Amino acid sequence: MSVFASLVERIADLLHPLFGATATAAAIVLFTMAVRLAVHPLSRAAARGQKARTRLAPQLAELRKKHAKNPERLQKAVMELHAAEKVSPFAGCLPSLLQAPAFFLMFHLFSSGRMAGHSLFAAPLGDHYADALAHGGVLGPAGLVYLVLFAIVAAVATYNFVRAKRQPAPTVDTDQPGAGAVAGLVRFMPLLSFATLISVAVVPLAAALYIVTSTTWTAVERAFLYRDMPAAGGLVTAA
């Protein structure tokens, strides 16, 4: 924990001549970008994996049809196909999993009182949106800082929603139990981007900066990595 705290404080010291009282906020943004840059190679691997799985969807559908009555043989055939194509079904989870420890450590740091005396313009980094509302209201000095963050998150979430609706949907095997529930979840997933608005409202402002920066990075990164993905034509199913 002290390593993260010391690193953020050191970055803030270096940025102080440029950012003055908002140097710690700038350090959090820079730290977040450094974390995301560190896991970018895994994000690239995840993108390659998703593109490969989209390409293999017809072959997977054929395997499901061929081995519909033999689940064990189907699982082995799918694994063999993934191995032959060098596709990992878990690659997409790695970037998020590796970011989680950094976020939780930083969240603990933000909630421990170490942010006392630091602010982003008129909003203390250790405060919550409720504090901003209690001291000036929605259009108060601190409230306006949150409004800017909410606007950024809403714009990114809207972009993610539109882009997700245009991306090819994952293959869903209609013969498997719970296929309808899975299909419904797939359709609902794009809306989860808007849940970030709730997170920004309930966590300390320092943590909100981490979330907003990471979410924005993700949107830009995915726009670059998935720029050649075909538009979706609807949910892909396998009979």
Image (cartoon, rainbow, N blue to C red):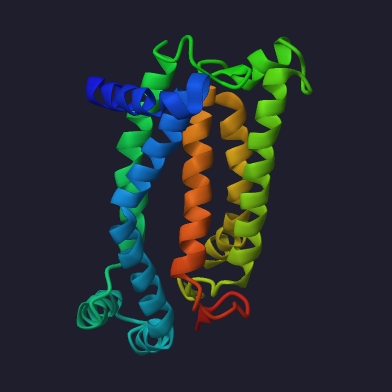
Of 60 and 69, the residue lying toward us: 60
Residue 39 seen from this side: yes
| Residue plotted at (50% across, 16% down) | 126
Q: Is residue 103 above or below residue 76?
A: above
x, y (%) of residue 132?
Answer: 67, 16
Residue at the spot x=49%, y=27% of the render? 19
Q: Is residue 238 left or right of residue 70?
A: right
Q: Would you place residue 57 above or below residue 31 in this image?
A: below
Regarding residue 178, the answer to whether it shows in the image is: no
Q: Residue at x 61, y 62 (%)?
A: 187
Considering every residue shown, the one lying at the far front of the view is 17
Percent position of residue 222, x then y: 48, 62
- Displayed quadrant of residue 225: bottom left
Residue 221 % position (x, y):
46, 59
Residue 51, by quadrant, is bottom left
Q: Quadrant of the N terminus?
A: top left
- So how many labels did they put on this image? 0
**Does residue 146 lie above or below 137 as drawn?**
below
Residue 197 screen position, x and y as percent:
63, 37
Residue at 43% x, 17% y: name it.
111
Above/below status of 2 relative to 78: above
Residue nearest the observer in this picture, 114 or 63: 114
